[in-house]
Amino acid sequence: MEYSLKEVQKHWRMFGIFAKNSLIGYMEYRANFYSSLCMEIVFLFSKLIYILFVFQLGIEINGISPDEMLIFTGTYTIMIAIYTGLFMDNFYGLSGHIRNGTLDMYMTKPLSLQFMISLRHVNFALPIPNLIAGITMVVMAWQRLVIEPSFIHIAGYIGVILSSTIVMYSVLLLPQILSFWTVKSGSITEMLDKCWDLNNMPMYIYPQWLRRMGLYVVPILFITNMPSVYMIERLDTLLTVWIMAAPVLSFVAVRLFWKMALKRYASASS
Amino acid sequence: MGIIRVEQLCKSFEYYEKELGFKHSLKNLLRRKMMVKEAVRGISFEIEQGEMVGFLGPNGSGKTTTLKMLSGILYPTSGAAQVFDYVPWERKKDFKMQFSIVMGQKSQLWWDLPANESLYLNKCIYELEDKAYTTALAELTELLDVKDLLNIQVRRLSLGERMKMELIASLIHRPKVIFLDEPTIGLDLISQKRIREFLKYYNQQTKSTIILTSHYMADIEDLCKRTIIINQGNIVYDGDLRRVNELFNAKKIIKLQFTDEVPRQALAGFGEVLEHDGMNAVLEIDKQDLQRYSKLMLDRFPILDFNIEDIPVEQGIESLYQRDGVRHESLA
């Protein structure tokens, strides 16, 4: 696929149309939309009770105060919203496309196949409660910590969220690409989902070897920790560089892996 | 020089076999014997611009695999192919802008949305100007008589209506090369005929190059002067369809259903009895005797149902093999 400004613009426009089509599709099935919304609210409440419990105990973990912990949890919740809204349905659908050969038609279109497969569907029901709750938690904690809400600070936080989103996209898509070899990828996805839960708590509660692995080798801990670490002003020089380098490196890695995997595609009976 | 050039193209697939039962599943879990299927075995041909060529062959003969390689979906195991000077599996954008593939069993339309949303999506994917899109849409919907169906959810359309929408979605950018893989599969006779008429008209008007795969003889007969017959991954015939037709139409199949039992011996004089169970029979008779024998049978036997059919494609191909002396092991 060619990389030019015109192509980037085209892909952005196409993403807008995908989102619009997904929304129209959702509107056709209102019951499903509302039930997904309710289910996510129940999940969110169960998580909030647990957070409230930790918060009320007022325990500091490795120097992280309960208010700072709320920043981590809020960011984690925002990242869940981004994942479920933009990526989850598409990523889970990849092995189905490979198994049933439905990738065929997408492959012949003059648009990046990876883009079409990984961003075709936008989920509008699942992310809403998480997004609202996540932003609320971050704003609340921000006020309680008396961090100055300057433009630079807000823009910086959004920038790190963007960097984390790219890392999240790459890290979570990578195992799904293995479906080109294994066809079904349920167990790999399950394993990664469990690893994703490591983000539930600040990375400072984990031993240093695990923290380093989760930041630099398989940057799963990067996803929610980096925006929070930026917010509570614990960034050192290495992490600052890593915030800029990790999305580039992880995206290049997933792109190369995708291209390699495509050569394996054998389609399916038709 | 042809717009499509194929030289010694091969494609093999790896697969595993599993015999019946749990024991073999367990065995396979520990160790699987890898098998290789040669789906396409060194085929070569050239197609000129504006030609409409039919790929004919039984299931599993390699027709679809060939089309998938020509459209860049599959990488070949070996060999070369070029479609307007592009190597299809390099998947260059300029190449993709100029061709289209329609697969009878695979949809590109959004299931929950009206077809017009999917068509608009293709407009943007193929970077069409508003005017070009509106003109093409008006023309195609008029030709296929689906103007009133554009606003209906795709999942509520009949198979025939959906196929017409698939065709519009594939042709909206006016491709120069079109690959059609079983576009009439599962459709009733009237819908099949409509689509054939449309394709014929479209080919004449746009001078587009079309490759059509089908195992419906009527599709190929109606549309393509040139036919490439593929069997077990090999091209066994490439040429004028009329010559193949002579072979296929030399004999006819008659299917009979009786109200009372009719012995096999009573039918033997009319032709070769292919199947017989007393109440039903299938006969193969010479075409020249068809009219005379049909009348005789209707007069002589207690017939409940009477059907005349063409010789199946597979059998026609077998006849072709025997005449041309091409060696083969068995038919798929």
Image (cartoon, coloured by chain):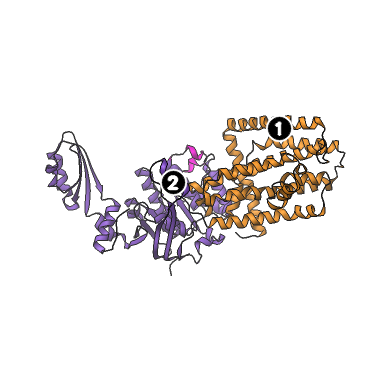
- Say which residue label 1 marks: A47
Q: Amino acid at mark 1?
A: Lys
B217 with respect to A6 (left or right): left
Tell me which chain the residue with mark 1 is part of: A
Image quarter hosting the N terminus of chain A:
bottom right
Extreme residue in the bottom direction:
B1
Left/right of residue A49 with respect to residue A25 in the rendered view: right
Q: CA distance from mark 1 to mark 2?
A: 44 Å
Q: Position of residue B91 (x, y in %)?
A: 54, 60
1 and 2 marks on the same chain: no
Asked if residue A221 shows in the view, the reply is: yes
Mark 1 in CB contact with mark 2 (< 8 angstroms): no
Q: Label 1: how many residues lie within 10 Å, few (<14), some (14-19) or many (20+)?
A: some
Image: A239 above or below B48: above
Image coordinates for residue A69, horizontal then vertical, percent: 79, 38
Describe the element under mark 2 as helix, strand or loop: helix
Give the SS element for disc 1.
helix
Which chain does the orange colour mark? A
Task: Provide the residue span drawn in magenta.
Answer: B146-158
- Determine the chain carrying the residue at label 2: B
- Tell me the colour chain B is drawn in: purple
Q: Is residue B134 among the parts visible in the rendering?
A: no
Where residue A46 appears, as percent x and y from the top left, is 69, 30
The stretch drawn in magenta includes residue B156: yes
Q: Which residue is mark 2?
A: B27
